[in-house]
Structure formats: C-alpha cells, structure tokens
Amino acid sequence: MNLLGIDFEEWYHPELVQRYVSSKREPKIINGIDRIIDILRKNDTYATFFMVGEILEYKPEILDKILSNGHEIGFHTMHHTRVDSFDSKEQFVNEIQTFDRMTGGKCRGFRAPTFSINQKSGWAIDILADHGYTYDSSVVPAKTSMYGMSDAEKKPYKISSTSLGKNDPSGKILEFPIMTTKILGKKIPAGGGFYLRLLPLNLIKNAIRNCEHRSIPSTFYIHSWEITPELMPRLHLPIKNRFITYHNLSKAKLRLEKILREFKFTSFERHIRSSNSS
C-alpha cells in the first residue's frame, strides 16, 4: 500500500510565490476542498491532509469535512514557514500547541514546508516527539536546489534530531521519505509536486512499482493548488519560479487520477495501524 499526502495550502503559501504577493491575500484554494475530497472518493483513496494552520483559522469547518470523509489531518506549520527559518524553538512549539487546540489533538503527523528538515532544523524532530507526534514526512532522499538529503534512506525509518537521514533505533518518530527515482544514474525526486508535472508519467509509475516490488510504501504528495489549478492566480514571477510553479499545472489533476486508478494509496495513520496489526 502506498501513501498519499495532500499539502493543503493557499495560492500565496509556496516559497517561490510568497515574496511576490502583496499583503492583500484573499484565500481561493480553500474553495476547492469539495472537489479534492470528491476525487479521492471516486478513486476509493484516503489521504493525509498536511494543513497550513492559518487556513483552519479562516475556515475551521473544513476540518470536520476532511475527518468525516475518513481522511486525516497533518501539520504543515501555521503559516507555511520553513522550519530552518523559525525565529526560535519556542515559536515552533507555540505553533504546534495552537494547531493542537484547533484540531482537538487529532494530529500525529508533520510535513515541513519545502521539506525543510535539515541539519539546521533537526531540533524540530525532538519537539514533535515531545508533543505526541508519531510520524514525519519531510525528508527527500535526493538533493535539489531547494531541499533534500542525497544519502537519506528511501524506506521508512526511525528519525531523530541527531540522525536525520539514517535509522536511529531509539528514535520516537517514524520518517516516511518522499519517493525518488534515477535518471541516467542521478537520483531525483519522483513523489509528486513539481516532479509529477515535469517527469514522464510512466517514469513515476515505474518508481511506484519498484517500491511495491521491494515492499516499501511509495510516499507521494500533491499540493491543493495543483489539484485546483483554476483557482491558482497567475502571478508575474521570475522565469525559474514561474516555470516551477506553473509548468504543466493544468495536467497535475489528471496525472494524479491516473496514478490513483492504477495503484492503491492510503493515509499515513491507516498505514501505520495496518502495519502494526500485521
């Protein structure tokens, strides 16, 4: 069984967009929640919604909509802030506590915006464990210009603040690294987002099959704004930012649906419960 995470964030949250957005920010992607849930329902798929907390502050009723349809809630910081750019550990703790109050203590998983768990921010793992979190999905076992640890494990492992990329038997947090593949010997991300829109679909499918053959869950993700491209404003961005943000954006939902029809996906906690009971 494979794992699906939906990074639920607004159009102004992506790192490559944030600095070019004015202070007047009207939420739009939130209006696509029903369409996203409907796609999952039609494909008999459960997902974990890694939610930016300020979205729940704006519209708290979507939490019940997510949970009542059998999906799970994960934490994606309150304002889509890179963990390695937090002003202090106390700020991160305050955000966890705020999100916990908003979700009634139902959250057990975390994903760092822009996969920003690294040597500078590894302290966050201990804080998550101290607050009852049981899993994380913030590691990409391939190096890119924005994130990644090329030597990190590709299968789930116990992560700790002193061992971010390799299994630590004493670790309290289970890490689910994002799926990768190789092209011409070079390891690259293949578990969704920009790479879902960039790579040939058959290459991604082969990566999922490879995980299944090795009895490893492929960890896949997609942004809420990639599933609802009609709600994503077209901003005037620098060429690289524009390419990464908008390239093949109109094809992301269709590609996701093709993957969901061919492979079985579930949410993180469902997978953990199933693994523990087997």
Image: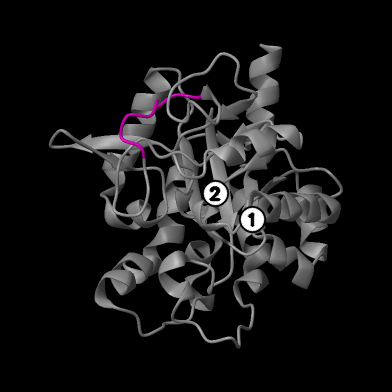
- Looking at the picture, how far across and down is residue 264, in whole percent? 53, 34
Callout 2, which amino acid? Ala
Q: Is residue 154 magenta?
A: yes
Reply above or below: 150 against 228: above
| Label 1 CA crowd tier, 10 Å (few <14, some 14–19, many 20+) | many
Residue designated by label 2: 112
Residue 59 appears in the rendering: no
Residue range of the region highlighted in magenta in the rendering: 149-156
Callout 1, which amino acid? Thr
Q: CA distance from mark 2 to mark 1?
A: 7 Å
- Looking at the picture, how far across and down is residue 3, in whole percent? 54, 36
203 sits to left or right of 77: left
Q: Secondary structure at mark 2?
A: loop
Q: Which quarter of the picture shows residue 224?
A: bottom right
Q: Secondary structure at mark 1?
A: loop
Quadrant holding the C terminus: top right
Q: Residue at x 61, y 50 (%)?
A: 40
Residue designated by label 1: 77
